[in-house]
Image (cartoon, rainbow, N blue to C red):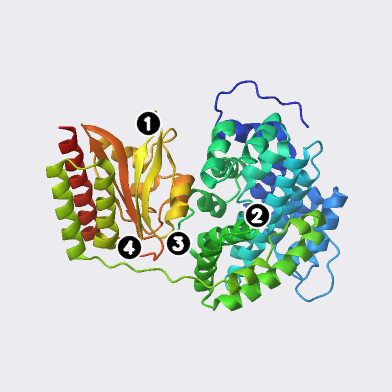
Amino acid sequence: MKANSIQDTKLRGADYWTHRISEQEMPALCSTVKTLEKLAKDDVSSMAILGQSVMHDNALTSRILRVANSVTYSKGITQVTTVSKAAVVLGFDAIKNICITVKLLSSLLETEGLSEGVYKRLLGLMAQAFQAAMLTKMLMHDHDEELQEEVFIASLLYHIGESAFWGTGCAETLVLDAKLNKCQSTVERDKAVREVLGTSFQQLSAGIARSWGLGSVLIKSLSQPDERTPEIRSIFLANKLSQLLSQKPPSILELSKRLKQTANILNIEIDELKARMIRCHKATEIMADAYGAHVLIDFLPDVNQLILEHNVPQPQPVIRAADVFEQLKCLRALTQCALNKADFNQVLSIALQGVLKGVGVDRCAVLLLTPNRKTLQPRIVLGDGAAEMKNNFTIDLNGDKNLFQESIQIKSALFVDNPHSSKWRLYMDDTLRALTSPSGFMVAPLIMNHTVIGVLYADKDTSGRRLSKEDFVGFSHFAELSNVCFSAAVK
């Protein structure tokens, strides 16, 4: 293990780790990638310079030729025996990406001194990224070869920040490995990463991508993962599927959801998608061997779990339409609560029932502030996936400003009709996107004695339906009347 130690507990952030990885931990890889990306912009001399730079590295030359002659890249002609000929046959982009992949794999897999736990994390993550890259290329098979190469490398490097961190073997890797072994949820995992690095792995990946000049597709896929263009959507879904299949067991509902979204992109049935994914997995094994990364094969995501998903009957989501009579009934009940100074929990229960059945959402929750006011934790949850939401839907208010903080500070309800729009994007980090619905959500402050004590939240995540202005009016009405009840109780 390298002799770096944690000198202080001060959070360092993405810039610190980007510089440290680029200048201290992996300067050779950083230099190689920057050189290759620079050559990609020079159409005249790039082929000759590439040939000269590779020629003196026998191991790199050997692996490039093995990959170039593999089933995935072979054009069905005679075997290529030189890098320059491979560049002519496959094109510069393909050779550039093969070089980057070879260098990345060798730099990380040949790192010495890693603890067993850290090394296994690194192998699992790299195998997952390699499978995702092959899946992304499969999803984009109808597009031109240049774009296929771009999405392959972007998907492969999607987790470059986390891979590079584990590959450093520094003291912080041991600290984080120990913390992650105790984490039970995604929220806990993200919090542990921030405690040690002062940033998220996705922000670190974005920092490295910009610093190393790793292309607009990768940068966009990291900064705008919800973008609906085919290439960004394919990268996102391929990584999600690869990540899910790496879990034992995976979330069957989540896996089914992602399979359906992916099948829709290709306009095929889910069974056909599964068959293609199994074939892609076999191709990934062959490519891993060609790249000299045979050790990754045992860590590749388990496609046999696709069969498991097939055999589990999937519950159909309950579509709750807006019910004016249910709204009126719950609003009358809240009015009586205000007159009778009803119990706090009774008010919340009636309000949530009104939002769930009256407004017609898929799920809703009351989240209360912790005593230090740095976290929102679910108190009552109703609707689809209530148990899972109760366990995972914890909002950290200690970091960058987010939508929940904004609602609390301005003491006003927010209607996030499109989380991907420029209006809301800066108020949402990766953790918040993972918890909330991509189709939109509503949040409103709960106020007692002029002080915000928590928030009311609702969305239509399960069905994927868009929220309407009428939904927001009804939702806001329940939040406001709940606050009236709290004020009455205090008086």
| Cα–Cα gap, marks 4 and 1 | 31 Å
Q: Secondary structure at mark 3?
A: loop
* Res. 303 image quadrant: bottom right
| Cα–Cα gap, marks 3 and 4 | 16 Å
x, y percent for residue 186: 54, 46
- Callout 2 touching callout 4 (CB < 8 Å): no
Residue at the spot 34% in from the left edge and 56% down from the top edge: 459
Q: Earlier in the sequence, mark 4 or mark 1?
A: 1
Residue 228 numbered tag: 3
The amino acid beneath tag 4 is Arg
Disc 4: which residue: 466
The amino acid beneath tag 3 is Arg
> Which is closer to the viewer, label 3 or label 4?
4
Disc 2: which residue: 156
Residue at the spot 61% in from the left edge and 71% down from the top edge: 141
Disc 1: which residue: 373
